């Protein structure tokens, strides 16, 4: 069928249009092959300035090949100023940066040079005491996926380089030459100070010369200083990929706090450390596949994971110590503060351990721990310890707690709730199987098996402060033990029986039906509820108080025997002093040991005889002898 004139005209126009488009495409292709990159200089300066928050300057940009779709580009006289908060100077300077850029990839964005040659590079890294740094640039969006890859370089050469680091937060300041060559790879040799002591930082890495950019790349770091000796040897998951790597890390330091200056994990002061760990870093997360070593006398092994999710940090760990001394968890400064506190307020039993969780408001996790042998310079009845520590949105729970003692064990739960206001400490601890002689430290006088419960709660930034305001109850009970007959007579305030037993039968023992020492706590003051002892032949009941605010004891034990004695010890047993140094006064003795001297004995004898013959003040009426309901009182105390 013959074409109409209109059809022929349309085809001619379409043909001309196609030729024009093809010509324009050819011209564009030729233009791209000879693209004058110098025109991009202002745009590149603006992009760098926006990324780092500081002005950027480029002297010139030129291409080495007149025509190429993968030209070598030379950027000359590069200078990036320091951010304003640094106070002047340059963050980065380079005489020349040479790179190969694929033009067509450049059109669609996301292009990364795979080869770089940098001459005369000077880098000045700065971080202030708050942690603000000049190298991080704009923060990534919270919902952005974590970075996992490196720069993707197959070749990197740096000639005549120099790097300086002034890190006020780490108190690390070093500077020195660095280079990357095809023959020797990465080399940095810097010197300066760390924590006010001379320091040297050496970093070495593998060759970056025609290699697979995703292959494992070896790297080593050595920081040597009197304050810390830190060594790491491992591989990154690709060239210069600091987002994914694994390493063996060793550390020696006078205190764990010095290591924390380097790794910034929120650690604390301790006695000298010697540690080794297998470490992995994967995007936002850290893994300690194995960690072990010593802190002071303590020896331990374990593993841990530290995961970053939704703006929170989760720590899950398992730790086991063959031996552990809590005194190792304080450095010289901490021990000096403890000594100064002891000199100012006297020795204390309640520990000043901080329970303020404000610095952990974004941290959760679980740590399972086990100690096979507990050590203490002053001696301890505790032998082993195991349990689980859980932290969930500022609620710290220590449960599955089992502490074995020289005899018996302690179990229970300790909780700190710091979701609002001041930290709230609560304890529910139970004691089983401990012997009375271990508890009172006098095996010749009294024996028996002890059970106990401590259910206290209070608010404060330390354990000591919280318990000094605590409410609740605390109790120990013992049934079916034995007690020296002379002690039973003293308890019953029977002077004649006491003298007779001391002279004729000093070793004789009588049954201890029960000892019930139950206390009610209100505002840190413990009052008997009740305090009672039944030996079968004598009964004693207590009154008074124990003030946890200053740990002072003011208790009185008054009793009587089954038979009404002719001579009665007028003065009750008084227990005073402090929790760390209690004092018992018997028969009116003021001696710290509680044992009356000759003068005290005759004074007590004189008062007893005077009462017996009706001299002096009329004595208070004595309660009738009534055996204790040991089962009921014991059950109530432990409820």
Image (cartoon, rainbow, N blue to C red):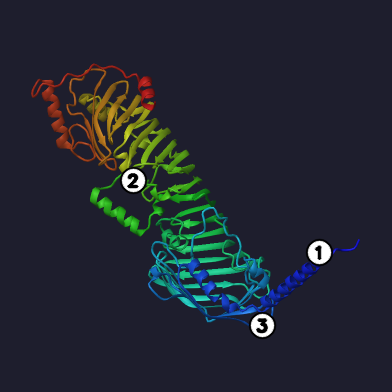
Front label number (1 vs 3):
1
Q: Quadrant of the C terminus?
A: top left
Structural distance between the alpha carbons of marks 1 and 2: 94 Å
> Which residue, given by chain and number where applicable, does mark 2 sit on?
461
Q: For the residue labelled by badge 3, is the local secondary structure a helix, a strand or a loop?
A: loop
Closest to the observer: 613 or 13?
13
Q: Nearer the viewer, residue 305 or 556?
A: 305
Left or right of 165? Residue 282 is right
Report, in whole angstroms, how far the alpha carbon at label 1 lies from the one at label 3.
Answer: 49 Å
**Which is more N-terminal, label 2 or label 1?**
1
Label annotation for residue 65: 3
Whichever of callouts 1 and 3 sits on the residue coming sooner in the sequence is 1
Badge 2 or badge 3: first in the primary sequence: 3
Q: Position of residue 369 (x, y in %)?
A: 50, 45
Tell me if I can see residue 126 in this picture.
Answer: yes
SS type, badge 2: loop
Examine the image and state in which quarter residue 433 appears: top left
Tell me the quarter of the image containing the N terminus: bottom right
The residue depicted at 41 percent of the width and 54 percent of the height is: 328
Which of the two residues, 395 or 276, is positioned nearer the viewer here? 395
């Amino acid at each position: 069928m013959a074409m109409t004139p209109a059809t022929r005209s349309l085809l001619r126009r379409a043909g001309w249009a196609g030729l024009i488009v093809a010509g324009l495409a050819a011209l564009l292709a030729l233009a791209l092959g000879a693209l004058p990159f110098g025109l991009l200089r202002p745009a590149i300066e603006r992009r760098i300035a926006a990324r780092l928050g500081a002005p950027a300057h480029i002297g010139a940009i030129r291409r080495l090949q007149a025509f190429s779709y993968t030209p070598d580009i030379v950027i000359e006289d590069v200078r990036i100023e320091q951010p304003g908060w640094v106070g002047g100077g340059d963050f980065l300077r380079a005489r020349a940066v040479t790179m190969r850029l694929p033009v067509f990839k450049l059109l669609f964005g996301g292009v990364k040079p795979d080869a770089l040659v940098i001459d005369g590079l000077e880098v000045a890294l700065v971080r202030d005491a708050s942690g603000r740094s000049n190298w991080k640039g704009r923060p990534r969006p919270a919902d952005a996926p974590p970075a996992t890859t490196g720069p993707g370089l197959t070749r990197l050469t740096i000639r005549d380089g120099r790097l300086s680091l002034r890190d006020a937060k780490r108190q690390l300041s070093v500077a020195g030459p660095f280079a990357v060559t095809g023959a020797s790879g990465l080399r940095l040799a810097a010197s300066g100070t760390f924590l006010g002591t001379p320091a040297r930082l050496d970093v070495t890495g593998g060759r970056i010369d025609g290699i697979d950019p995703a292959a494992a790349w070896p790297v080593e770091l050595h920081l040597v200083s009197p304050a810390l000796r830190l060594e790491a040897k491992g591989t990154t998951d690709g060239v210069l990929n600091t987002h994914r790597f694994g390493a063996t890390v060793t550390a020696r330091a006078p205190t764990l706090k010095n290591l924390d200056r380097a790794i910034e994990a929120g650690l604390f002061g301790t006695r000298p450390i010697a540690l080794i760990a297998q470490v992995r870093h994967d995007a936002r997360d850290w893994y300690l596949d194995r960690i072990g070593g010593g802190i002071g006398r303590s020896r331990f092994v374990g593993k841990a994971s530290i995961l970053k999710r939704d703006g929170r940090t989760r720590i899950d760990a398992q730790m086991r110590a063959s031996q552990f001394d809590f005194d190792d968890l304080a450095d010289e400064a901490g021990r000096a503060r403890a000594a100064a506190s002891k000199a100012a307020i006297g020795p204390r039993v309640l520990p000043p351990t901080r329970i303020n969780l404000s610095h952990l408001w974004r941290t959760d996790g679980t740590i399972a721990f086990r100690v096979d042998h507990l050590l203490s310079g002053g001696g301890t009845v505790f032998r082993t310890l195991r349990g689980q520590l859980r932290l969930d949105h500022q609620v710290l729970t220590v449960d599955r707690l089992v502490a074995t003692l020289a005899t018996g064990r302690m179990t229970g739960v300790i909780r700190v709730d710091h979701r609002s206001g001041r930290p709230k400490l609560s304890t529910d601890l139970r004691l089983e199987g401990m012997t009375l002689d271990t508890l009172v430290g006098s095996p010749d006088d009294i024996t028996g098996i002890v059970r106990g419960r401590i259910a206290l709660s209070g608010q404060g930034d330390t354990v000591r402060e919280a318990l000094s305001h605590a409410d609740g109850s605390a109790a120990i009970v013992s049934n079916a033990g034995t007690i020296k007959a002379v002690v039973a007579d003293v308890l019953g305030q029977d002077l004649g029986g006491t003298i007779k037993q001391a002279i004729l039968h000093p070793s004789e023992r009588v049954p201890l039906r029960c000892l019930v020492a139950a206390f009610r706590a209100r505002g840190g003051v413990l009052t008997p509820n009740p305090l009672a002892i039944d030996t079968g032949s004598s009964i004693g009941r207590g009154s008074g108080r124990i003030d946890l605010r200053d740990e002072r004891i003011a208790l009185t034990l008054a009793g009587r025997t089954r038979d009404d004695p002719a001579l009665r010890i007028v003065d009750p047993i008084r227990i005073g002093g402090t929790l760390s140094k209690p004092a018992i006064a018997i028969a009116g003795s003021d001696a710290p040991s509680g044992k009356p001297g000759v003068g005290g004995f005759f004074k007590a004898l004189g008062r007893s005889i005077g009462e017996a013959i009706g001299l002096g003040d009329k004595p208070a009426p004595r309660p009738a002898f009534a055996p204790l309901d040991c089962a009921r009182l014991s059950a109530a105390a432990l409820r």
